[in-house]
Image (spheres, helix red, strand yellow):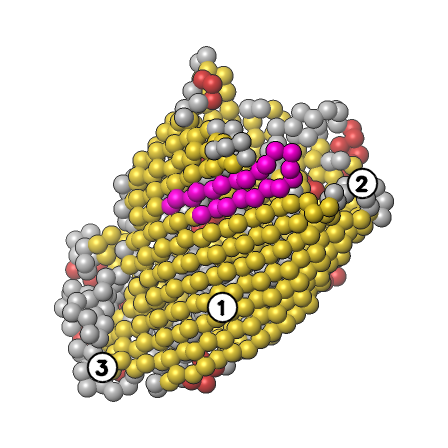
Amino acid sequence: MNLKNTTSVIALLVGAAMAMPALAAGAAGGSATQLEELIVTAEKRAENVQKTPMSITAVSGASLVKDRVLTLEDLGHNLTGISFTANSPQANEINIRGVVNTRLTSPTADQSVSTFVDDVYVSRSGNLNSAFYDVSRIEVVRGPQGVLLGKNVAGGAVNIISNAPSFDPSGRVTLSLGNYDLRQSQGYLTGALTDTLAGRLSFQTINHSGYAKDLLHNTDLENLNSVQVRAQLLYKPANSDLRATLNVDYAKDSNDGVNRVGIKSPTLPAGPNIWSGTRSLIAALRPGGLSIRESFPVWPQFQGDIAPTPQGARHETYDVIAKIEKDVTPNIRFTSITGYRDNRAFTLYDQTGLGPTNGFNLTGAQLASVGSSLLFAEPVNFVEQVHQFSEEVRLTSTDTSSRFDWIVGAYYLKSKVHQFNRFWGESLVLPTLSGESHWDDYGHNQDLAAFAQIGYKITDNLKLEVGARYTTDKKGGTQQGIIVATGDKFHPADTAPLTPLTANFITPYGASWSKLTPQAILRWTPTDDMMIYGTVSEGFKGGGFQNDASKAVAAATAYNPETVTNYEAGYKAEFLDHTVRWNTAAFYMKYKQLQVQQTLASCLCNVISNAPGATIKGVETDLQYAPNAWFHAWASGSYVHGRYDTFVFNGVDNSGHLMQRTPEWQAAVGAEVTTDAGSWKDALVGRLSYRWQGKMPWAPENTSWEKAYGTLDGRITLTGPGKGWSVSIFGKNLTDQVYRTNIIVFFNDEMSSFAAPRTFGMEVSAPF
């Protein structure tokens, strides 16, 4: 599809939308809608999502609970136009419209798709591993947002909004039990503390056993122990427009590591299958064979330690958010949002899940028979500490009678990231895969921005909004590479340092980038039930520096910022007496200098480079139908066609290839039915949803693919009289579909991580 064809599609969509008012006018009058009405703040004003001129999906807290969406991964597997992959417990990778920050975890790396919590930017991709709880809504914004969203956003954003304190007292506690020894508790209590002060206390704990097994150490993998607490205060004096809130959030979680399985690639040329071949030998020796939920991760014994370090991940985070809103004049509101986040993380995982030390005394002849003579293990350990401070101030017009409205503001972000990484390897053959290397990296990042937007109602139904943001990113630090040990127990005389480090070094690095990102939006509301919009916008993400560099010059060499220009048209409509809602957007995006990180199998090293250009185009649509109080159905779909224009990396020409980790097609359908249970009116609710994702390439080479798959989720809830207590049974991935959340190609094997298997359980909830 070229630009001309895309323009034709946009014109067709707009033409269809323009025909809808007649359909709406022909319906019966009134407002009998059962469709959920959601207010969003993505444009820094409280506005009905149906009136917001952007592609945005708002998911209410109630829907999150019904679909058991607890994490970013769950969210990515529940919606269309968004997907989720994860290289490690330290790196969440959210993909919107083909834009994903794949494995960019250096202290200076930004996210292409950004995450916000209560309007405060979360700078690190691994800083948000704890589960959602007591959430009012989640706003998923698609496409670049270079003006108002907070931090300049290149690919899109996920904003998680907590439930606010209330002066009306209420509380609830919920307990869940399920397979894999699931034990979950959550609850909240809110109410007035004084005439002007309200509070809210929320908590959640989650514990479950592993979805996989470490057979070498008889230990669970992919288990979870998590605790989260949030305390909030709301100050709202009587007869005053002042509103001040303070949120203090604490989260701590741990697990025993990830499950990595080497699978023979069905698409790569024939060659040595080091790990899948070894697994086949082990499977033949074990009664019952070897499943994809079983692996043999190596625990490294680092230099100076008296015992090996177990695989695992631990995160501890607290954040403080203060928000003040006050009218400084009758028609101008001042807003201040201050955020501080502190995060400590420890991650250790074996990249291959199987090494020479595996509990089986396989001979050289056996290994050679399946092409496994090069068998090696390289566990990696990341220890990270982050301090982040941000401040945003805004002045917003509030005169609704004026044809003009405007917003002006400024933004400041400062973060300090200390990352200490340890690589440890043992190999049967290659000396560069034996030994121990360390990297000590202190990075500091500063973001300064000023932004403004003005809107003008050309007519009562036609409005033009133009805005711009000027951003300056400054990044710097010092990285040290340390050769700690060479050789291993198999080859103690090796002198080559463990890859990717080639020599000891210590070097400073630093650079800054600036960019003006404009935006223009034209919205037309021919009726109260219809909004049509067109937008041209630009997003920007600063450059950065390579972590775990091979030498000083690599550590001090910056990769470039990326920019994206987005052309988008869409409509949002309700008709047939507000029982049908249909939203659609078509887009065409041009990317420049897209940041891509890839793993070179020859050295097991990650390299960040810039793809000079990429073109992304597609359509997203969402349809809901709620003819009465007892039935609600929905369907959504997306088509995203993203290709690299020109991109040559390490001698491989990826020009014209599909963009990595981007499924072209996604679809989701679901329905909820409410009925009576005996004399209890509307007491029984059944909900079923299905999401399908088409095949996608894992890397720019387009040589390894994830096949298409679908997942089915369900829930049945019985609520007692008076809408008090409730009992639910739930199931996720009911068909036990096997699909992967990450692969990295090593030689001819695909090192694979798998999504959770079928899970189910029971939940009891009661107010107090």
**Magenta span includes 245:** yes
Check if mark 1's residue and mark 2's residue have beta carbons within 8 Å: no
* Residue 490 position by quadrant: bottom left
Q: Main secondary structure of the magenta part?
A: strand
Answer with left or right where residue 277 lies relative to residue 306.
right
Q: Which residues are magenta?
A: 228-248
Nearest-to-viewer mark from 1 and 3: 1
Residue 487 marker: 3
Q: Residue at x 27, y 55 (%)?
A: 256
Q: For the point 46% across and 37% down, which residue is it?
A: 200
Q: CA distance from mark 1 to mark 3?
A: 32 Å
Quarter assignment of residue 243 = top right
Residue denoted by label 2: 401
Q: Is residue 604 left or right of residue 642?
A: left
Which of the labelled discs sits on residue 109, or is there none?
Answer: 1
Q: Which mark is residue 556?
A: none
